[in-house]
Image (spheres, grey):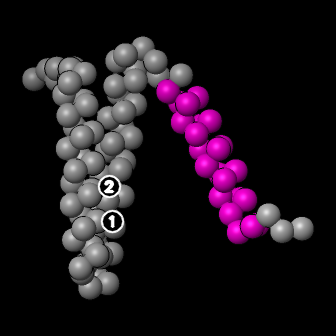
């Protein structure tokens, strides 16, 4: 049995669907007890890993894998910089 390479639309569809499922799980977690919320967070973590893998496959299929990784690193650097400055409040 040979596995066919998914189309770009299929890969994007997987990301979109997984994002919808994460949102649904987050909404359920808000109204859940701690044990259920913990299970839902575990599921969200697995879903986010699926999204990351799918995006990596799509970036490779589009021929922009290294550029995508560089964009992600740059974004993470900006986020980390912002987080480091939170709470400073501009006071000397």
Q: Residue at x 58, y 39 (%)?
A: 75
Residue 12 vertical placement versus 43 (above, below)? above
Residue furthest to the right: 92
Q: Where is residue 11 shown, x and y percent of the image?
A: 24, 29
Find residue 12 and report its image quarter.
top left
Residue 86 vertical placement versus 6 (above, below)? below
Indicate the secondary structure of the residue bearing disc 2: helix
- Quadrant of image for the N terminus: top left
**Magenta stretch: includes residue 8:** no
Q: Count residues near mark 1 (Cα–Cα under 10 Å), then give few for <14, some for 14-19, many for 20+.
A: few
Tell me whether circle 1 and circle 2 mark residues in contact (CB < 8 Å): yes
Asked if residue 14 lies left or right of residue 48, the reply is left
Q: Count residues near mark 2 (Cα–Cα under 10 Å), then give few for <14, some for 14-19, many for 20+.
A: few
Residue 36 vertical placement versus 75 (above, below)? below
Residue furthest to the top: 63
The residue tagged 2 is 46
The residue tagged 1 is 42
Q: Which mark is residue 82?
A: none
Find residue 3 and report its image quarter.
top left
Q: Residue at x 75, y 67 (%)?
A: 89
Q: Where is residue 87 shown, x and y percent of the image?
A: 71, 69
The magenta stretch is 68-89
Judging depth in this view, the residue of 60 and 28 nearest the camera is 28
Q: Where is residue 82 shown, x and y percent of the image?
A: 66, 53
Q: Residue at x 46, y 18 (%)?
A: 64
Secondary structure character of the magenta stretch overall:
helix
**Magenta stretch: includes residue 72:** yes
Mark pair 1, 2: CA separation:
6 Å
């Amino acid at each position: 049995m040979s596995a066919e390479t998914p189309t770009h639309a299929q890969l994007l569809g997987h990301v979109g669907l997984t994002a919808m499922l994460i949102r649904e799980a987050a909404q359920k977690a808000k109204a859940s007890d701690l044990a259920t919320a913990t299970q839902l967070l575990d599921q969200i973590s697995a879903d986010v890993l699926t999204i990351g893998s799918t995006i990596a496959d799509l970036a490779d299929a589009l021929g922009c894998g290294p550029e995508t990784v560089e964009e992600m690193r740059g974004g993470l650097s900006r986020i980390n910089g912002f987080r480091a400055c939170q709470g400073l409040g501009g006071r000397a």
